[in-house]
Image: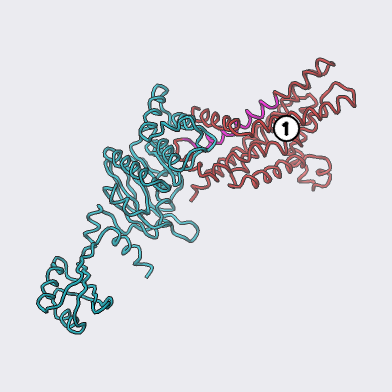
Amino acid sequence: MIEVRELTKSYGTTIAVDQVSFDAHAGEVLGFLGPNGAGKTTTMRILTCYLSADAGSATVAGYDVFEESVEVRKQIGYLPESAPLYADMGVIEYLNFMTQVRHLPKSQRKERTRAVIEICGLEDVIQKDIGELSKGYRQRVGLAQSLIHDPPILILDEPTSGLDPSQIIEIRNLIKNIGQEKLVLFSTHILPEVSATCSRVLIIHNGKIVANGTPEELSSQEKGEEIVHISIRGSQEAIESELNELEFVSQWSYVDTDDGIVGYQIHAAQDSDAAEALFHVVVKNGWSLTELRQESVDLEDVFLNLTDKEQV
Amino acid sequence: MTNITAIFKKEFRSYFNSPIAYIFITFFLGISAWLFFRSFFFANQAEMRGFFGLMPWIFLFFIPAVTMKLWAEEKKLGTVEILMTLPIQDYEVIIGKFLASLALLTVTVLLSLVLPLSVMYLGDPDGGTLITGYLGLLLMGAAYISIGLFTSTLTENQIIAFIFGITVCFVLLIIGEDIVLFNTPNWLYPIFSYLGLGAHYSSILRGVLDSRDIIYYLSLIGFFLYLSTLSVESRKWR
């Protein structure tokens, strides 16, 4: 439904989006992950026809975002970052305005307004002005406006920022539900959010896409080797000479000594069951083992790895 | 058309949702009543020349105050991002907003009709000049609105939009005045004297409804609405 090819956009000399290409289809929840200023918002603004790119092409539901922008905008529900809304309007008044500019037939306006109020849990605040609402409710009104015309594509920029934990969970569930039939594209800089909601992740850094895959794929990519943390009571010299002998250990580093207990971080070959092997080595040598822990590789490492690389 | 209507309704209501409309109407009526009755009782004449004569200067401050928020506020709040990603053409938003301000002005000006009606009751003013006078007032106000709307698209700061709006209106107002024309180089003279807002207004006030004056106002409005649309579109220029 969305096809992006070598999209590039710069502000002055800063390149915000650098030759970004990706595809997205209905039934997907696509997470845009990246540090602040990575180019997530700019990409979304180009897709929603708010800005235009310097080069490259993008089509949404078959329409070109530069040439057929009004058609594209009809297909999209968009919630910009921090849900900018008219503070002096009432909640109902605002949603009503949206049904008009979204060209809903008169017969459906009430019904759709009622539907989004229910979906977004706005029943308690329909009498209020938007200016009186808390951040969480404002975010929900923003979400309601993006859903009002039942769009096939939903683009949400940091939809959970500023919400409390239970609201975050609600919004995530909502996104998952919508994503079963439609295409949801949302950005975040919060990692757990991605594994909790997305069917696919795009990691963006300095305007470039540095990773594209399901959360599981990305974690397993990173699992090139096993990392084990071990603390042993014994002679440091003997332990180190033993570590040098071990075939499966590709690299080890000394961490610290505490009260005669020596700690090491050990990098071992993939699928070598290093923890178990190390245990046997310790027993064989008559040392005592005080700690043995396999460090897990998760999305966080993938993210840090990919986004740190260039700064180093 | 549905789009323009929707934008118009939203903007017009937002004037009345906030204190702007009430403040505008109250101040405008208060000041015009003062101006009107001052000349009325001192000069002892049942006519409104004093009232109409001062309006360009009063509008100069009032109208940019009404239009300054039209775009600058949307930019500041970020609501422009939702607005411009709706399936609406940029010019439809501009026209809707222009019409909303014009409607507020029309309501206010109509309310001030109480003054001439009281004059009618007390004396026998020239009905023809009254009608053309009010028409001239609205045309001039509409021109100011289009200018104020344009300056509002240039910035996200309402104060800057306000001051810049006053400046542009002021320049247009005075370039047709004799004192300015006297010092203008000959080749600029016809341009200035045509562009001057004041001259066209005063000829309407004299009761002469010349199509050239109406065309002047309409093209001025069209020009600034076009500039506003360009200014709004400029975010997408590459």
Whether B96 is among the magenta residues is yes
Query: Residue shown at 69%/29% (left/top)?
Result: B25
Q: Position of residue B24 (x, y in %)?
A: 68, 33
Question: Which secondary structure type mostly characterizes the magenta part of the structure?
Answer: helix
Query: Residue shown at 57%/34% (left/top)?
Result: B97
Q: Quadrant of residue A272?
A: bottom left
Which segment did they paint magenta? B88-109
Whether A157 is among the magenta residues is no
Position of residue B71 relative to residue A94, above or below, is below
Q: Which colour is chain B painted?
A: red
Q: Which colour is chain A painted?
A: cyan
Q: Which residue is mark 1?
A: B27
Task: Specify the amino acid type for callout 1.
Answer: Phe
Q: Quadrant of the N terminus of chain A?
A: top left
Position of residue B71 relative to residue A305, above or below, is above
Q: How is the image coloured?
A: by chain
Q: Quadrant of residue B13?
A: top right
